[in-house]
Image (spheres, grey):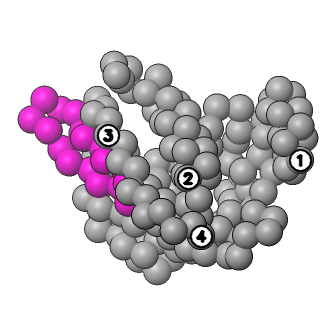
Amino acid sequence: MNDTIEASIVIERSYAASAEELWNLWTTRDGFQSWWGPQGFRTDVREMDGREGGAFHYDMVADTPEMVKAMAEMGRPASHESRGTFTEFKPHERLVLTHIIDFLPGVAPYDSTMTAQFIPATDGKTRMIVTLSPMHNPEFSEMQKQGFTSQLSKLDTRYDWQG
């Protein structure tokens, strides 16, 4: 870790979807697989135990020839295993996922948290606020932000979000 204290990354969206619908995208196998991962990647869920203390386990897989090539050019595998735990689970309101970051060569394993809040609005939309904890260095924090923003573009299209 470096000596710089980084702020968490906060990303907000309002979607024409219910809190329950958005919640299910985060906590069920089918929902998670339908959007998780940046553009050009897919997620193959091995385990999804949607409850407080429940485990999640998935593979993030480069899913296009361009992404497979890009990963090879960076010296990274075309897929990697990810796992963690639902450390807070308040249905349709607040969810905390704690990922175990143990797949980076030369970096000691550490925990990274991601918080999602779902706030119903009077216009039938739901405000989703996602907070990403900083990664082990600023470069990876920026990659995390870009990757998650790309990932959200799948929901942006599905729910016709205008940013």
Other-residue count near label 4 (Cα within 10 Å), few / some / many at <14 / 14–19 / ≥20: few
Image position, residue 98 (x, y; %): 50, 70
Point out the frontmost of discs 1 and 2: 2
Name the kind of residue labelled 1 in the image.
Gly
Location of residue 80 with respect to 107 vertically, above or below: above
Q: Closer to the camera, 159 or 133?
A: 133
Instruction: Kindly identify which numbered label has been placed on residue 75.
Output: 1
Find numbered disc 4 in the image and state the secondary structure of the residue it sits on: loop
Q: Earlier in the sequence, mark 4 or mark 1?
A: 4
The residue singled out by tag 4 in the image is 1
Name the kind of residue labelled 4 in the image.
Met
Q: Is residue 154 visible?
A: yes
Q: Is residue 14 magenta?
A: no
For the residues marked 1 and 2, what is the alpha-carbon distance in whole angstroms?
Answer: 20 Å
Q: Residue at x 31, y 47 (%)?
A: 129
Q: Residue at x 64, y 31 (%)?
A: 39
Other-residue count near label 3 (Cα within 10 Å), few / some / many at <14 / 14–19 / ≥20: few
Location of residue 69 with respect to 145 vertically, above or below: above
Name the kind of residue labelled 2 in the image.
Pro
The residue singled out by tag 2 in the image is 138
Instruction: Kindly identify which numbered label has been placed on residue 12.
Output: 3
For the residues marked 3 and 1, what is the alpha-carbon distance in whole angstroms?
Answer: 32 Å
Q: In the rendered structure, which segment of residues is drawn in magenta?
A: 115-131
Name the kind of residue labelled 3 in the image.
Glu
